[in-house]
């Protein structure tokens, strides 16, 4: 197969970017000047409104001119002409009265911020409170100044009348007082503690003044030079409070007045080339105190500015028009819902009580909870009855009820009762549509929500794969295992955007998961230079698993550089634009590996599969790689102790023996299930019996058709290239003319670091992982680095840069 050549992304022209930035700045300055001049025009217009009445009344001299705006013969007295008369009439007379002067302040501040290139978002608080003050002042003047309607404006006058009609004058006064209190507390920050501190400070200042006057009258003489030296010595005394010092006679000590300006987030610091020192003279000419001024600091946070300019990074932007599958794609079944058969429940209850009585076990109380396929009978035995005695009667109760799959829970965790699960004679199917459309699933705030089905109490059972963090499924043939996998995948397709999750599907049977081929460029991940994203060849599974290990190592390097602990923190930091893509950072989608028949892989590959699976299970949780492994017979040679230890979440469909049940669940019970989607879910402690949701093949086809018909990415999500010990399917390039343009630079980095890894080249040369992997292959072909050694870094065969120069010289001579 011909190797596809990928075009490197075209680098942006810095001159073009500089031109764009310059144009944006020009528009910003132009808008700033416009707003400042507009504020001045408003101020002139408003002042003129009040001083040019000529005894007629505020602004009334120009009243007729406002209505005759287009008549050039009409004269006005406003200093800004007819435009000024119109603006003043609109804002003051018909608007908010004298409170309109605050609009001048807001427009002027907005213009000033634009001119000084300050973030406009900092004015948000000012705009809110000034608009609040405009409304309150307008109503206040409308209430207090009936004879001068211009003070409150038409808005204030009408709003005042409206309030008085509904709450009266007293209520209006109380509302105005409450509004003023809100402004004083939240805007001016006046509080009882602040008032108390103010008066205490004044009292202390008066007391200090009186004390100083008293001591001056006693004739005590101070040595001012000694006082000055003592104060100056305090200046250079180390302190942890602040690094800002004010060298003047009034405040020579370190102050913390600007402590609130300290920003703990990363900031851009602009350092002056050489800060001029401040010299303090002393009495001794040979002794000079020199204090260097603080460096200039920009308190603007780079990440915050990027978020302000461009918003949070949106990983879904490339497929912004993507639509999630609609619920009506799922089949609507008519025979849905639990049917309560009163006669059956009474009959089963009587038989349970009768059977227990035969063994001299009395029951104090019994309660039935009807589920889709199983009914739970909770019994409270009389005092003195041993639980183990009831547990041993499992087969006897099953015989008396003539039912298959009796399961006794003794006791039920969290309750003081014993449970007996009895299958219903007419079990009800749980359609996938009923669990997907349930509020519990739709409103689930989980990273990877999965709707498995419904419990015995008929509640939708939703779990988070991200918290499991890996899932082990087992069950005999035909008991619902493949339908369970489809339910898991369908749940994620209904909840997660293609940018947020990717699937690696392994299907040795070649028929179960092939339906999902149609969403390859939306949701699937695969190795480079492979045709099918769904893996059906067991030999390719080994390379895929090892590639996932490389992806895991690469992601951990990114987390280390970002100084975060897990994928959630990393993606939040990336969305907040605190990580630079030029340093290799990118948004990390969750990766879900699904293996439909694990036993077949173990039989054909053995340790080559078990080792990467165990490694992923141990380490991959934090970086968002989660495993779902399914098998028919959970024997100990398939599900080894190492695998079981790292798969705390288990799903057991019906198995054929108690041994298989203990292998998958570490306890019995799976052999007592009734099949057809009846399962037990365990995540460490408790067992939950669930009727798995049924999703048929035509339903899956409709869903993938709906997704596949939409705009997709250019290709599937590419995993890192992996080359096995035999070289795999990748031929190492030995022709010098075909080497990468950065081959020599990469060789120098590898030799200097004495560490042959693709991730090192990716970080140092700011390359993609695929190109870095090709460089490593070329370095191996040239003999500079050794062969692949699993998760270890490759050995470096050249000790230093001098030897590397000799290597390249000899290579050129041999051409």
Image: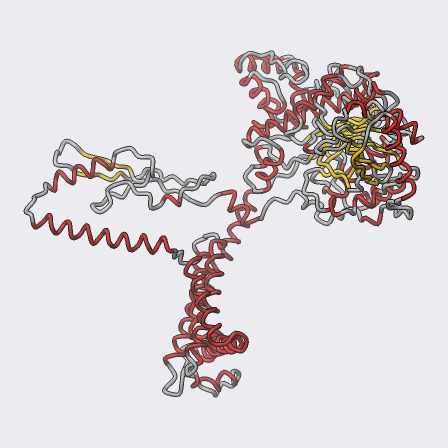
Horizontal and vertical percent for residue 676? 89, 33
17 in relation to 39, above or below? above
User: Horizontal placement of 158 versus 731: left or right?
Assistant: left
Quadrant in which the C terminus is drawn: top right
Residue at 83%, 22% (x, y): give it.
392
Q: Residue 248: image x %, image y %?
A: 22, 45
**Can you tell which quarter of the image residue 36 is in?**
bottom left
In front here: 170 or 191? 170
Q: How many marks?
A: 0
| Colouring scheme, one of rainbow, by chain, secondary structure, one colour | secondary structure
User: Do we see residue 506 in this rendering?
Assistant: no
Is residue 282 positioned above or below 142 on the image? above
Q: Position of residue 611 (x, y in %)?
A: 72, 17
Between 43 and 463, the one lying in front of the other is 463
Q: Residue furthest left?
A: 219
Is 792 in front, or is 132?
Answer: 132
Q: Is residue 313 visible?
A: yes
Looking at this view, is 610 or 28 the one in front? 610
- Location of the N terminus by quadrant is top right
* Image coords of residue 344 (percent x, y): 91, 40
The answer to whether 630 appears left or right of 154 in the picture is: right
């Amino acid at each position: 197969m011909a190797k596809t050549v990928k075009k490197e992304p075209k680098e942006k022209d810095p001159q073009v970017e500089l031109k764009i930035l310059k144009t944006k700045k020009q528009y910003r300055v132009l808008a700033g000047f416009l707003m400042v001049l507009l504020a001045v025009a408003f101020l002139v217009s408003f002042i003129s409104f009040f001083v040019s009445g000529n005894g007629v009344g505020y602004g009334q001299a120009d009243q007729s001119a406002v209505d005759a705006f287009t008549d050039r013969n009409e004269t006005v007295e406003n200093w800004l002409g007819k435009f000024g008369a119109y603006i003043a009439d609109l804002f003051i007379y018909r608007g908010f009265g004298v409170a309109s002067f605050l609009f001048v302040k807001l427009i002027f501040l907005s213009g000033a911020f634009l001119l000084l290139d300050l973030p406009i978002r900092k004015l948000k608080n000012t705009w809110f409170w000034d608009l609040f003050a405009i409304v309150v002042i307008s109503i206040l003047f409308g209430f207090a100044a009936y004879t001068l309607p211009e003070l409150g404006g038409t808005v204030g006058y009408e709003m005042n009348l409206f309030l008085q009609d509904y709450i009266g004058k007293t209520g209006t006064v109380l509302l105005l007082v409450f509004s003023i209190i809100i402004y004083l507390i939240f805007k001016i920050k006046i509080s009882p503690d602040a008032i108390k501190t103010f008066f205490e400070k004044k009292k202390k200042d008066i007391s200090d003044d009186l004390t100083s006057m008293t001591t001056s009258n006693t004739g005590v003489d101070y040595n001012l030079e000694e006082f000055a030296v003592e104060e100056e010595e305090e200046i250079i005394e180390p302190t942890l409070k602040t690094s800002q010092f004010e060298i003047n006679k009034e405040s020579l000590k370190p102050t913390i007045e600007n402590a609130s300006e300290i920003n703990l987030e990363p900031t851009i610091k602009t350092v002056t080339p050489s800060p001029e020192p401040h010299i303090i003279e002393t009495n001794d000419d040979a002794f000079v105190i020199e204090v260097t001024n603080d460096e200039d600091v920009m308190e603007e946070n780079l990440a915050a500015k990027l978020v302000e300019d461009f918003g949070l990074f949106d990983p879904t932007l490339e497929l912004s028009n993507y639509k999630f599958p609609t619920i009506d794609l799922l089949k609507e079944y008519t025979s849905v819902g639990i049917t309560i058969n009163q006669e059956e429940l009474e009959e089963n209850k009587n038989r349970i009580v009768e059977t227990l009585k035969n063994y001299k076990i009395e029951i104090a109380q019994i309660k039935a909870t009807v589920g889709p396929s199983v009914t739970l009978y909770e019994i409270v035995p009389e005092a003195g009855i041993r639980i183990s005695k009831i547990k041993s009667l499992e087969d006897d109760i099953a015989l008396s009820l003539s039912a298959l799959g009796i399961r006794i829970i003794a006791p039920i965790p969290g309750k003081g009762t014993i449970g007996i699960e009895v299958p219903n004679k007419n079990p009800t199917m749980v359609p996938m549509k009923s669990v997907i459309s349930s509020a519990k699933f739709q409103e689930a705030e989980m990273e990877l929500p999965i709707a498995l089905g419904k419990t015995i109490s008929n509640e939708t059972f939703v779990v988070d794969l991200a918290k499991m963090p890996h899932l082990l499924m087992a069950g005999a043939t035909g008991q619902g295992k493949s339908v369970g996998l489809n339910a898991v995948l369908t749940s994620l397709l209904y909840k997660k955007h293609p940018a947020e999750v990717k699937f690696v599907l392994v299907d040795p049977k070649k028929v179960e998961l092939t339906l999902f081929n149609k969403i390859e460029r939306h949701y699937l991940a695969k190795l480079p230079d492979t045709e099918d994203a769904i893996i059906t060849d067991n030999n390719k599974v080994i390379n895929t698993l090892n590639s996932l290990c490389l992806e895991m190592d690469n992601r951990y390097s990114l987390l280390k550089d970002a100084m975060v602990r897990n994928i959630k923190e990393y993606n939040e930091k990336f969305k907040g634009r605190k990580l630079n893509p030029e340093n290799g950072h990118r948004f990390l989608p969750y990766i879900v590996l699904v293996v439909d028949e694990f036993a077949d892989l173990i039989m054909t590959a053995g340790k080559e599969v078990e080792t990467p699976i165990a490694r992923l299970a141990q380490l991959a949780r934090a970086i968002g790689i989660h495993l779902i492994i399914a098998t028919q017979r959970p024997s100990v040679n398939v599900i080894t102790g190492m695998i079981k230890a790292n798969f705390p979440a288990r799903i057991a469909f019906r198995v054929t023996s108690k041994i298989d049940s203990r292998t998958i669940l570490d306890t019995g019970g799976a052999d007592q299930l009734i099949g057809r989607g009846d399962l037990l879910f365990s995540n460490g402690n408790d067992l939950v019996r669930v009727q798995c949701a049924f999703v048929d093949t035509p339903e899956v086809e409709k869903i993938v058709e709906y997704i596949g018909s939409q705009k997709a990415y250019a290709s599937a999500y590419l995993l890192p290239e992996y080359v096995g010990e035999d070289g795999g399917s990748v031929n190492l390039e030995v022709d010098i003319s075909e080497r990468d343009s950065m081959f020599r630079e990469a060789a120098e980095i590898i030799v200097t670091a004495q560490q042959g890894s693709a991730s090192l080249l990716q970080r140092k040369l700011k390359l993609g992982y695929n190109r870095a992997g090709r460089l490593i292959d070329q370095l191996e072909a040239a003999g500079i680095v050794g062969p692949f050694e699993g998760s270890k870094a490759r050995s470096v065969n050249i000790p230093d840069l001098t030897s590397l120069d000799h290597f390249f010289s000899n290579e050129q001579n041999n051409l």
